Every structure is written in structure tokens, then in C-alpha cells.
Image: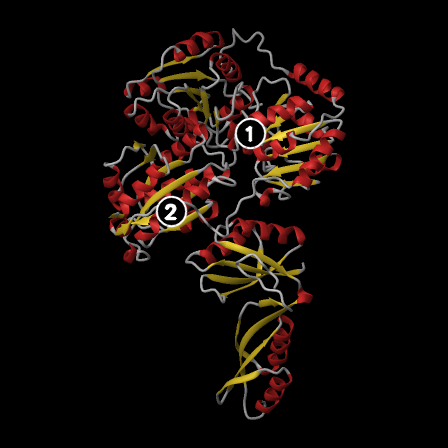
Amino acid sequence: MPKHTLSVLVENRAGVLNRVAGLFSRRGFNIDSLAVGVTEDPEVSRITIVVNGDDYIVEQVCKQLNKLIDVIKIKKLDDRDSVSRELALIKVGANASTRSEIAQLVEIFRAKIVDVSKTTLTIEISGDNEKVSAMEDMLKQFGIKEIVRTGAIAIERGNKYIKASNNDEE
Amino acid sequence: MEMTGAQAIVRALEIEKVEVIFGYPGAAICPFYDALLDSDIKHILTRHEQGAAHAASGYARATGKTGVCVATSGPGATNLITGIATAYMDSIPMVAITGQVSTEAIGRDVFQEADITGATAPFIKHSYLVKDPRDLPRVIKEAFHIASTGRPGPVLIDIPVDVQNGKLKFDYPKSVNIRGYKPTYEGHPMQVKRIAEAIRKAKSPVICAGGGVISSNASQELLELVERCEIPVATTLMGIGAIPSDHRLNVGMLGSHGVYTANYAVHHSDLLIVLGARVGDRAMARVSKIAEKAKIVHIDIDPAEIGKNIGVSIPVVGDAKTILKQLLAIVEKGDVEKWVETITRIKRERARIFDGIMEQNYVKPQYVISLLSDMLAQDDIVTTEVGQNQIWTANYLKVKKARTFISSGGMGTMGYGLPAGVGAKVGKPESRVVVVSGDGSFQMSLQELGTIKQNNLGIKIIVFNNSRLGMVREIQKNKYCGRLNQVFLDENPDFVKLMDAYGFRAERIMRNKEVQKALERMLEDDRTYLLECIVDPDEPTL
């Protein structure tokens, strides 16, 4: 099923994330990923949700989310017209003989080595879902010890803005 | 003016014109009860918090005002849950106030602590946990606004005991501004025009009227549309009363527990106008089949309901009353004579006649409800429990106007009818209130007889006693090869004696020929009365 990215502006209050997450489980919607953070307005948080489903499901998700009093605005982001990023920290096994090979891969992916030990390397990579997954695939051969991944965050291209106030474009 | 949080709650309720509260005190809500002593707001002490929530819901349905219930923290709050969920499923405006353990104790699992905002999240319109007494005026203002506008529903305000005891300068907001909550009332004019066009072209139109017609008080407008355009009306369970039951164009309740004429009309229509209904599974199980042939118009104030269960050709978001008014300004009648003739003929042929039942050894519930209908005035209110008693009443009661038939539709909550009757009677003291129940459901809120007694309410109770959980028994009989399990209530108490223990009058009848006189005795004065009717355990629901 196709993936859809939703940007949801919510009141920055206790319990809001619980309401949003609870709605997904109660209605049987599948969340691929969810990321939340405060916006330029400290009273507003932005949740980026990647949801799996057909048009009917996505429409239902949007409508049900809109019913939550704390939800201010929802926008479905068009893949072609938005930039999406995930961040991952990957701890991979490394020794004297593999270290340089890993470092080369890191360079190709424009990732970063953020920690080194005698037996491991920790790599920071950001990019869209595919890029992060590809990096992960390439590192598997060295033995991945641990992965931490964030959910996707996304923003529209160009001079369009999603704001709590009404105008989307300037 | 400086006052305590508890005083602020009471003051806010007064400003919201709350006349009565249904509740049950406890330690964590004591400051509120203390402040309530200095107010004119009436408090009805129920015998169980669930009864308080149901009573607030019955009150709201009968009066159209927002019902208010109050309970303490922990078990008091969790006991409200079934009542809150019942109100949510039927879109009933309600504000529930719960006490909570003090702010610094929250999360430590102290005595009588329960996360009630968390527990009610799946079936509440909105909830608040108030952590600062200064927020109380705004929160209460918002709660009443949210509960009663748009698609109505329950709102919970959880107030820790220290917040009730805290101090604030009371300043009640004049207006509400919630940026994430702006319900749409007016229908899009283009869409309304399309409905009018569809009605003009339709050969066999049907309106399916739901609870939205009642909550928006749109009966008058609906009647005008129906009579001007000659459109038959089927109702959902929640829509009963939207149009008088004996109106020639009312074809009755549709769905799996409805009547033939209503289902025939819906399935043979070329235009189905769903008005303030959510197309629930019990009302329209085979929706895709209907949609194959008919153009479907769906009018609802909740955009999330439109397209949820049925594909729609003309969706219109807005308030039923407002949209009907918009429609009435432009709508014209279509060519529907033949269709109306067919439908009225089928309705006539299908009318139930009670013949040769006088000598039978049991009481026929359908007959009781039919006779009762003829004896009630148009403002008298009937509430039901859930089970066979609900369906018998829904299909045989002649409801004369909106807000006089009160029943748990979406949730199907047994134990709803009696406390809802309490709420209805408190809200409409001039109306007679009849609670129709079964022997099973009656015993689920039996303790509220104490509430009726203490408040001298004068409620009429009909118990259809088949010593069974009749509807479950029927399911087991038909779908589980007759392997009946746990549906026998053979050791029921003697209901007449039980009523006597409360100082209420009661009688038991066994035959149909006793019904008329017994109903007359029940209704002859305004005292509480229970009429127990012994019903054949094999009596089917439909």
C-alpha cells in the first residue's frame, strides 16, 4: 500500500500526542512513522506522520484527526513537492582491516562518523527513507550492533508554509 | 473576585445556566460539594456513578440542554465511563466533572487515583486535566461550548483536589476561541442546489432521518420538506421521533431490527437522503447494494461520517436544520405519486393487527406498547433498556414528537433506561416518564429506584419478564444451534415485592386481556408504578 506523509499542526500541550497515537490504534490505521517537535510558534507542535494506506484510509485519518480539538491543521504532503528526511545512528562492528572500507562507504553516502572505538564505529546518516535504508543495507556485512532511527520529518518545497494561522502561501 | 477553584466551578456552572447536576460525592471532589451548598443548582444523588452519567444523558436528550454529571476520582470516575461512552456513541451533549488526587500525587498510584482522561480518550469529544485553578473559567466555558456545538458529545473535566482548593481571580470569558474547533453549520450552496435537483428528478426518493435531526431540532423543517415533496421517511433508532410515528409518510425504523416497509423503501429507492445519521451497521448492513441503484445524499455535521460507511454522490457537511432551511428555499417536488402509492400500500398491508391474542397465556409486549402509545400524551417520554424490550418499543411505540423516545442506540447499553428515565423526569417534570425494560436490563440499574424514591420522581416502569436474556437467547437459538448458555434468569426476585420494599406500587399481569386495565392503573396518577408483564420466553424480537 502506498505511503502518505501528513503534516499535522497541534496545540503544544500535555496529552496531545497520546490522543493522536490513540486514534490510530483505535481506528486500526497503520502508522509507518511519527515524529513530533515544536514549531517556530512555541504554542504549536508539528507532527509528521507517515501512514500506510489507500486514499480512503488517508481521507479517514485526516477527517478523524481533524475532529480532535487539539489538532489545528492537517496537510497531506505531495512526495514530489516536498523534502523528507530521516536520521539514523548506526553502530557497526569495525576493526583495523574494515575501518577504512566503512569510512569510504560513509563518504559515498555523505554520512558522518560520530564515534570510534576499538571494535565499533558509530555512523550518523540523514536522508530520505530509501537512502537511510540503503546505508543500513551496505553496513550489514560488517555486523550492525545497534540502530536508532527517527521518524520522517517533511517540509514543502518553495514558498509554501503550513502555519496555524490561515494563509498557507505568501 | 477572588475565590477557590471549587467556588469557581460552581460559579461557572451557574453562568452556564446549569439547573441540575447528577452525581455522587467522594473525597477528591469534596471541595466542589462544599461550594455547591451555597448555590441554587439542584443536585440529584444517584446510587451509582454510572447512573449519574446516564441520568445526565437522559436529561440532555429530553431537554436539549447539556447534561452535567459529577463523580470523585478513581472508581467514581471509572464508573462514569460506560455512561460517557454511551453518550459519545449517540452524540449527546454532556459535561462530566471528576475529582482527581492532588497534582503532586498524580502518577504515584495513590489511593483512588485513576487516569480518567487517558481512560476515556477513545470515546470522548474532548477532555481536560486542570492543573492550575486560574484555567478553570476558560476550561469550563470551552467544555460547555464543545459539548453542545457541532456534533454534540461528552466532555470531561478532571480537577485535582488541590486545584479545587486553590485560589483564583474569577473572570468568566465571554466567548470561546479554539483554533482547532470550528464546526460547519451552513451547507455549501452548490451542494444544496444539487440535492434540490436530485429531489426534483427522483422517482422513488427516501429520507433516512437519524439522531442529527433531533439534536438540531429540525423536526419542523423535515416535516415541511417531506410534505411538500412527498418523500417517505425511514428513521434510524436514534431518529425515532424526528417525524411522528403515525405520519402517513413515516415508514418506520430501518435496518436489521427495523420493519419491512422501511427496508423495502430504502432498497428500492433511486435517491436516498441520509440526514443526520452515520449509516451504522445495524441501520444499513448492506449499504453497497443500496448504493448500486440509488443516488446517495449524505448530510451530516461531522465530516468524518461522510463517506465512512457508504459511498456518497452528494456529500454535504453542516447542521441538519440549517441545511433543510436552505433546501426548503429552493426545492420542488418530483414525480413521485406512484412511489408514494406503492409505499403506503405496503405499509398498510404490513400493519400489525393483534387478533385472537386475548386468551393467550402470556402478555404480548408489542401489544402492551401499542396500547401504551394510545394512552400517552404527546409530551410524555418513553425510555428503554437494551435487548428485545428496546426493539419492541422502537417498532411499536407511536412517538409523537422529538425528544420523547430515549434509548441507547450506538452503544446498546443495558441499564441505561432507568437512570435515563430519572434524568428525563428531572428535566421534564410535567411529562410522564415510562421506562420500558426487560427483567435482565432492569436489574442492571435497579439501585436507581433509591434515587427515584429519594427525589419523589414518579416514574412508570414496565418490565417484560421472560426470565431470559431474550435477545442473546435468540442469537444462541438461531446462530449457535440452540446451545443456550447463561441466558436464564430463573431466580429473579419478586419484582412486585421488591417495589414494595421501596414503598412503590406494582403489579404483575400474565394475560393480554389484563393489559388495558393494568396500564390504566399504572397511569392513573403520578406516583411511581411498576407493571411486570410475564412474556413468553419464545417471543421473538421481530
In the picture shown, does residue B338 fall above or below B106? above
Is the residue marked by circle 1 packed among few (<14), some (14-19), or many (20+) residues within 10 Å?
many
Whether pointer 1 and pointer 2 mark residues with C-beta atoms closer than 8 Å, the reply is no
**Tag 2 or tag 1, which sits nearer the N-term?**
2
Please provide percent x and percent y for residue B526. Answer: 36, 15
Please provide percent x and percent y for residue B75. Answer: 33, 44
Q: Is residue B116 left or right of residue B500?
A: right
Q: Quadrant of residue B184?
A: top right
Q: Nearer the viewer, residue A58 or A170?
A: A170
Q: Nearer the viewer, residue B540 or B346?
A: B346
Q: Nearer the viewer, residue B488 or B264?
A: B264
Q: Is residue B209 left or right of residue B5?
A: right
For the C terminus of chain B, the quadrant is: top right
Alpha carbon distance from label 1 to label 2: 30 Å
Please provide percent x and percent y for residue B24. Answer: 30, 37
- Determine the secondary structure under disc 2: loop
Rendered image: mark on residue A77: none
In the picture shown, does residue B453 fall above or below B315? above
Residue to which mark 1 is pinned: B218
Question: Residue at point 56% right, 22% down?
Answer: B395
Q: Amino acid at mark 2?
A: Pro
Q: Amino acid at mark 1?
A: Ala
Q: Is residue B15 left or right of residue A35?
A: left
